[in-house]
Image (tube, helix red, strand yellow):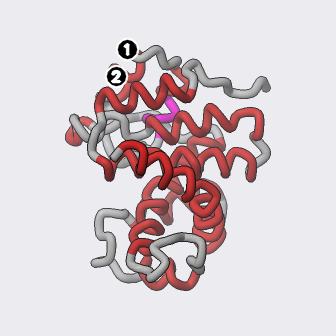
Amino acid sequence: MSALQSSLTRQQSWDLLKQYNSDPFHLQHALTVEGVMKWFAKDQGFDDEAEFWGNVGLLHDIDFEQFPDQHCLKAPELLRAGGADEALIHAVCSHGYGLTAVDAKPEHQMEKVLFAADELSGLIWACAIIRPSKSTRDMELKSVKKKFKTPAFAAGCSRPVIEKGAGILGWELDTLIEKTILAMRSCEDEVNGAMASIK
C-alpha cells in the first residue's frame, strides 16, 4: 500500500488553520498535536507519512473555534475549500467518531492515534503547566495518572475518550500515556518557539 501523502504543504495547512482560528489556546493545541502526530508516525513505522500525520494533527480542530456546535461536521467544507483531499478530510473527522454526528470511523493507524492522543495531549499539558518547570521534560507517568484519576482536573479532557482511544489501538493506558509524554517532549521547544512568534 502506498504511503499517505498530504495534498497540502505544511505552510498551506498552517495558513488554512489560521483562516478560522486565532485563539492562542487553540493554535497551541493544534501545533502540539501536529508535533505529537509526527512523533507517532516515526514511532509506528510510518516515517514516510510524517508530514501527512502532522498536517492532520494541525488541522484536526479547524472548525472548533468558530463552529463548536458543528465540530467535525463543518470541517469537510472548510478543508475542501482549502484544497484538502478526502484522505485528509476523513482523518480529521475521524477523531469525532462516536462523539459527534460524524460517521468517519478511525481506520488507519494514524486516525487511531489521533483519536487517542488528542484529548490526552490536553491533559498532559494541563499537568505540565502547574509544574515548577512548566514543561513535559520532567513529566512522569505517575504524575499524569494521578491527575487522570481526578475528574475535576482538566475536566474538559475526556477520560472515557482517552481510554477508548487506548482500546482502539490495543494498548494499555500506561503505554499510551508514556508515548504521548515522549511525543510532547519532542516538539515542546518548537511549539513554544512558534507561539512566541505569533504573540
Identify the residue shown where x is 54% and y is 34%. 55
Q: Nearer the viewer, residue 67 or 130?
A: 130
Q: Nearer the viewer, residue 142 or 184?
A: 184
Query: Magenta segment, which residues?
Result: 90-94
Q: Nearer the viewer, residue 170 or 142?
A: 142
Mark 2 neighbour class, 10 Å CA radius: few under 14, some 14 to 19, many 20 or more: some
> Considering only vertical position in the picture, is 53 above or below 24?
above
Identify the residue shown where x is 32% and y is 52%. 25
Element on which disc 1 rests: helix
Image position, residue 194 (x, y; %): 47, 46
Q: Say the numbered circle drawn on residue 155.
A: none
> Considering only vertical position in the picture, is 184 above or below 56?
below
Q: Amino acid at mark 2?
A: Leu
Label 1: which residue? 81
Identify the residue shown where x is 36% and y is 82%. 150
Q: Amino acid at mark 1?
A: Ala
Image position, residue 84 (x, y; %): 49, 19
Residue contact between numbered discs 2 and 1, judged by CB atoms under 8 Å? yes
Image position, residue 20 (x, y; %): 29, 31
> Considering only vertical position in the picture, is 197 above or below 169?
above
What predominant SS class does the magenta segment belong to? helix
Label 2: which residue? 78
Q: Is residue 155 left or right of residue 28?
A: left
Does 110 lie within the magenta span? Answer: no
Q: Nearer the viewer, residue 108 or 77?
A: 77
